Amino acid sequence: MDLKSTLLVIGGSTCSFKLLNTIIRFLPTPEPAHKKAWKWRNIVTSLAHSSLTGAWAVLCLYNQPHMAEDLISCHSLLSHSLVAVSTGDLLLQFGRKVASLSRLSCGVFADGDQLCFPPYQTASPPVRFLVFRLCTTGWMIHWLSTHSELVPRYVLMMGTVGLSLISTMNMVLCYRLVRADILTNTGNTGKDH
């Protein structure tokens, strides 16, 4: 896939996920999500992205099973398109986070978090953040850095830029989590005495 086609797919993906998010705005929102309808829309859009790309990844491996053995030099047009579509959604999410850092948008890895720890459960937010954000991103950074000599330069550049965006978003979210959940609780404990 040439650069022009890749950029076209990325742009089309960004617009498609933005359109989906807008359409969801006009659909009924569940009662518990009324106070944070924007978060509900982002979770549903992110779940649609995860479902699409998850099935797409399985299809890529089904069509070319040897790709599972060599993730670096083996790829197909279908797998390259998958990365371009995911990049489009990542750009949309990053845009939402930059446009409004005052509210927590659903990130790339938050679907597992939302499915495993629904709001009515009492799982610790720092543990959820560690498992679903930091560990996943850390593994991807480790994999990319250990295989940097084997990965084509443009793929390495795209991966580095993408992981830099994700890491930046994670740092902001970590700061907000510490400020909201840990520092607030520490301040309340001191006032009770």
Image: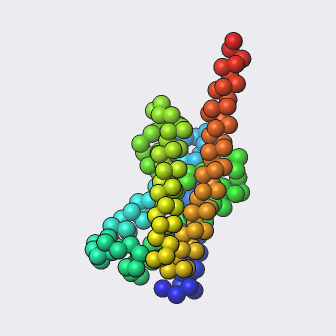
Above or below: residue 47 compared with residue 114: below
Q: How many marks?
A: 0
Relative image position of residue 93 (x, y in whole percent): 60, 59
Q: Position of residue 135 (x, y in %)?
A: 48, 50
Using the image, determine if residue 122 lies above or below residue 49. above
Q: Viewer-proximal residue, 30 or 17?
A: 17
Q: Which residue is nearer to you in this view: 143 or 1? A: 143
Can residue 178 be seen at all in this image of the molecule? yes
In the depicted structure, whether residue 149 falls above or below residue 35: below
Residue at the farthest top position:
193
Using the rendered image of the protein, determine whether residue 84 is visible from the camera's viewpoint.
no
* Residue 79: image location, x then y, percent: 41, 75
Question: How far from the left and from the top, in percent, is residue 78?
Answer: 40, 78
Give the residue at x 69% y 12%.
Answer: 193
Please state which of residues 140 and 14 is positioned toward the viewer in this rendering. Answer: 140
Q: Residue at x 56, y 73 (%)?
A: 158
Residue at the spot x=35%, y=74% of the render? 70
Q: Report the coloring of the rendering.
A: rainbow
Image quarter for residue 98?
bottom right
The residue under the point 32% across, 70% down is 68
